[in-house]
Amino acid sequence: QLQLHESGPGLVKPSETLSLTCTVSGGSISSSDFYWGWIRQPPGKGLEWIGSIYYGDSTHHSGYAFYNPSLKSRVTISADTSKNQFSLRLSSVTAADTAVYHCARHRCTSTNCPFDYWGQGTQVTVSS
Amino acid sequence: QSALTQPPSASGSPGQSVTISCTGTSNDVGAYNYVSWYQQHPGKAPKLMIYEVNKRPSGVPDRFSGSKSGNTASLTVSGLQAEDEADYYCSSYSANNFVVFGGGTKLTAL
């Protein structure tokens, strides 16, 4: 059974960089069959896609990443296949970045594919 | 403000049918048959209920169905049960923004 688990600091200071890691078990992020993504949910609000990465192409060592245009200037998603993890970095954070952050798997190899497996999510609060 | 518009709440009595709408634009819902619906119970991760407008993943009861007309997609829950009480989010592929979500609808079983 595929499982995803988010980890990282629960508190980040304004203007600093938020860093989270998603550890995948029961499947490989190097699989050519899936994309992997990050989604967040601010308190009392809806879901927001942050970005996704595809690491199944052996000819492209850093993977292909796709980002929400509204966050693109601040976001980097990368992967560590040796640890079967992918990571999120969000720079210059403000209180508006306070949210529960989920990692998830697209059920096929495109961003038009829905998310079929999700992590439980991790709360990140931006505050001094 | 979310890219897709959903009513904040919906309700129905057990056994009734309830429909939740999701309105987008000709750049997302209206352009592609890549609309998904997710169910989220409090404190839990979202669960995929419908994908590609009207397809159900294995294990999702056939009480849940999806449809689309123009720029509006809909999720219908037939024979509403107490366990269906949750937040529901629609999502669509968008050529401009790749993945967009709705603001969510809280479904209450009266």
Image (cartoon, helix red, strand yellow):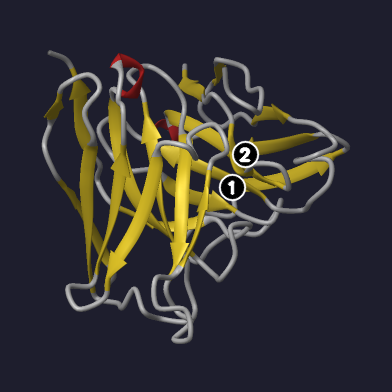
Q: Is residue A97 above or below residue B41?
A: above
Question: Crowding near pointer 2: few (<14 within 10 Å), some, many (20+)?
Answer: some
Q: Counting residues from the N terminus, which is met first, the one under dot 2 or under dot 1?
A: 1
Res. B79 in view: no
Looking at the image, which residue is at 34% across and 73% down? A29
Q: Position of residue A106 (x, y in %)?
A: 48, 61
Mark 1 lies on a secondary structure that is loop
Q: Position of residue A128 (x, y in %)?
A: 12, 13
Q: Is residue A18 above or below residue A4?
A: above
- Numbered mark located on residue B63 in the image: 1
Q: Name the residue furthest right.
A: B70
Q: Disc 2 versus disc 1: distance between alpha carbons?
A: 5 Å
Of residue A33 and residue A90, the one placed in the foreground of this image is A90
Of residue A123 and residue B66, the one placed in the foreground of this image is A123
Q: Which residue is mark 2?
A: B78
Question: Crowding near pointer 1: few (<14 within 10 Å), some, many (20+)?
Answer: few
Instruction: Assess whether mark 1 and mark 2 are in contact (beta carbons under 8 angstroms).
Output: yes
Residue B21 placement: quadrant: top right
Residue A69 placement: quadrant: top right
